[in-house]
Image (tube, rainbow, N blue to C red):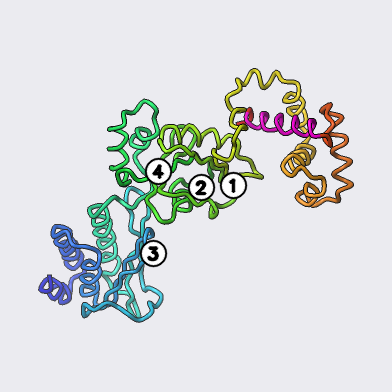
Amino acid sequence: MEALVIRLSQLDSAAEGAIRVVMFYDTLMRRRVDLPVLARASAGLAECVAGIRLHSTGRAVRFAPDGSAASTPPPPPSSTAPITLDEEEIGTVWLERPGATGPLDDMVLERLSIAVAAAVERYGPARTTMADPALVELVVSSDSEEAARARALRLLGFAAGAPVRVVAVRSHLPLDRVGALLCPARPVKAAPLGDVGVILAASVDPAGLPAGVRAGIGAAESPDRSWCEARTALRFASVREPVVRYEELGALALLAEIPQGASRANADVAAIARLAGNPEDLETLDAYCATGSLRRAADLLHLHHSSVARRLELIGKTLGLELTEPTGLLRARLALTAQRLLDG
């Protein structure tokens, strides 16, 4: 390897140099070297500090041209390239060359990124988030045999017997990004199943999810039952409550089992449907049902409580309910939730 680096550093022809760079990294890949060796060899080849960072770990591997680990704080890189695996960017490689970039720097980084992706794929489960939808479906399908489900989980990178959380997602963001935000520590896998995204994760932390993402989180230990729960919980998600845990729904989950025809035929639900034509009234009722308090609803809506009181009085007359009474408030809450389930 050292002899090849020396020969490459003496090349005059850019074309010949590019070919030898390809040969250099082909040799490293055949030898199945790890990331530190790739960074060290690249630094010797480029005659400047070379670095590798994977998004999954956040740790940088940097080596100087003499083969020692670079310990000084990294300056801005002179050139960078993404590491891509299964069409997902999983990290970055870079060179820290003082002054102008070298004529072969782009070629070195291109081949280094390919070699790193191959090494990541080889040494343990691939660190990409997006997964084969067929494998994910095998995990969450109620028709799968347990042996097939366990094998699919192993292929996806989950240890045997380890807990797996199942999340149903609707998002304008790519699923791989949502998965990384839900489970930064990994492992996490995501795939689209129909019009809903499914995320399998070792643990779930929805606190980092950006606005616009709605998620339902299953509670059951079995992935197939957890997937059913997650989809049910997703139906209850709203702008005010974008992430819903099935275990926190309690008896409300029973509303999801009511046939849609029966819900639409209910007088309270039909009245809420008519109210939906006035978004301001619907938002007021939603805030009041969510808080159960006139003043807290006014705080949510950034209105004076007397204004909210007048609105609720008119809304109550429209619905035929006395919203200030416990029974009227309960009926409004149930009807509002049932209408939300009908809206999907």
Looking at marks 1 and 3 on the same chain, the residue that comes earlier in the sequence is marked by 3
Q: Magenta segment: does it hold 65?
A: no
Q: Position of residue 331 (x, y in %)?
A: 75, 29
Q: Position of residue 17 (x, y in %)?
A: 18, 68
The kind of residue on which mark 2 rests is Leu
Q: Secondary structure at mark 3?
A: loop
The Cα atoms of the two marked residues, 2 and 1, are separated by: 9 Å
Mark 3, residue position: 58
Q: Secondary structure at mark 1?
A: loop
The Cα atoms of the two marked residues, 1 and 3, are separated by: 26 Å
- In this rendering, is residue 338 above or below 310? above
Q: Secondary structure at mark 4?
A: loop
Mark 2, residue position: 173
Foreground mark, 4 or 1?
4
Kindly indicate the quadrant of the structure image that contains residue 251.
top right
Foreground mark, 2 or 4?
4
Identify the magenta region.
326-341
Looking at marks 3 and 4 on the same chain, the residue that comes earlier in the sequence is marked by 3
Looking at marks 3 and 2 on the same chain, the residue that comes earlier in the sequence is marked by 3
Looking at marks 2 and 4 on the same chain, the residue that comes earlier in the sequence is marked by 4
Q: Magenta segment: does it hold 330?
A: yes
Mark 4, residue position: 164
The Cα atoms of the two marked residues, 3 and 2, are separated by: 22 Å
Which of the labelled discs sits on residue 212, or is there none?
A: 1
Q: Are marks 2 and 1 in contact (CB under 8 Å)?
A: yes
The Cα atoms of the two marked residues, 2 and 4, are separated by: 23 Å
The Cα atoms of the two marked residues, 4 and 1, are separated by: 25 Å
Foreground mark, 1 or 3?
3
